Amino acid sequence: MRRLLALALAALLPQAAAAQSVDAGYPHTVMTALTEMGRNPVAKTYESGRSFVVFDIGSGQGRLTYYGCNDAFANCKDLIFATGWGEVPGVTLDTLNKWNREWFITPAIQNTDGTISLTYNMVHAQRIPPEQFRATIERIERAIGRFSKALAPGSAGLQANLPEERVDDGAPLPALQSLD
């Protein structure tokens, strides 16, 4: 009887660990963590079916998109953070390259329409302790603040309504290329 009870308890431990941690495979854990941080998360879905969460960060909103999912966009493994600004007057590719050398945690990319995006990969976002998830979001928020102050004071501010990034689930994200 004790052996049966021990086996049943052992089977529940992974579920308990997942429930206490932030895990891209369990979207409710991401929503709970962001809610507990006071970030006002809202779950949304792209036309493709991929899920993402919009939440408060910095002076605007950011987005966490689920990646590494199965064909039904479930059982995801990764999260990718993104936010962006409208056109930022006076920012050149040289300025962005300088930012990327100094702040590699959140690379800045100028999109073809002139907007700027900051991204951060939380690769293998499985069973992240809540404190680590909070620290990562806060680190991203500090970088956003510094970017806003240093490079984007004349912009319209943060926006989470960026288009869906077309990243193949099995392929790594493309490396940033230096334009120096």
Image: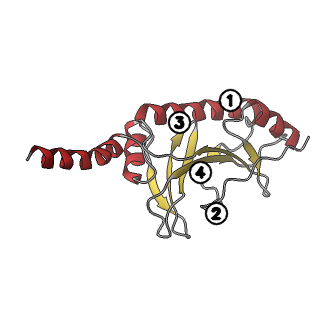
The reply, left or right, for residue 89 in relation to residue 123 is: right
Alpha-carbon span between mark 3 and mark 2: 24 Å
Which residue is depicted at the point 32% across and 46% down?
14
Residue placed under numbered mark 4 in the picture: 160
The reply, left or right, for residue 154 in relation to residue 133 is: right
Q: Earlier in the sequence, mark 1 or mark 3?
A: 3
Which residue is depicted at the point 83% across and 47% down?
177
The reply, left or right, for residue 48 in relation to residue 96 is: left
The residue closer to the viewer here, 96 or 4, is 4
Residue placed under numbered mark 3 in the picture: 137
x, y percent for residue 23: 43, 47
- For label 2, count other residues whose C-alpha is less than 10 Å away and answer few (under 14), some (14-19) or many (20+): few
Tell me if label 1 and label 4 are in contact, CB under 8 Å: no
Residue placed under numbered mark 2 in the picture: 168
Alpha-carbon span between mark 1 and mark 2: 31 Å
Alpha-carbon span between mark 3 and mark 4: 15 Å
The quadrant where residue 95 appears: top right
Alpha-carbon span between mark 1 and mark 3: 14 Å
Tell me if label 1 and label 3 are in contact, CB under 8 Å: no
Alpha-carbon span between mark 1 and mark 4: 18 Å
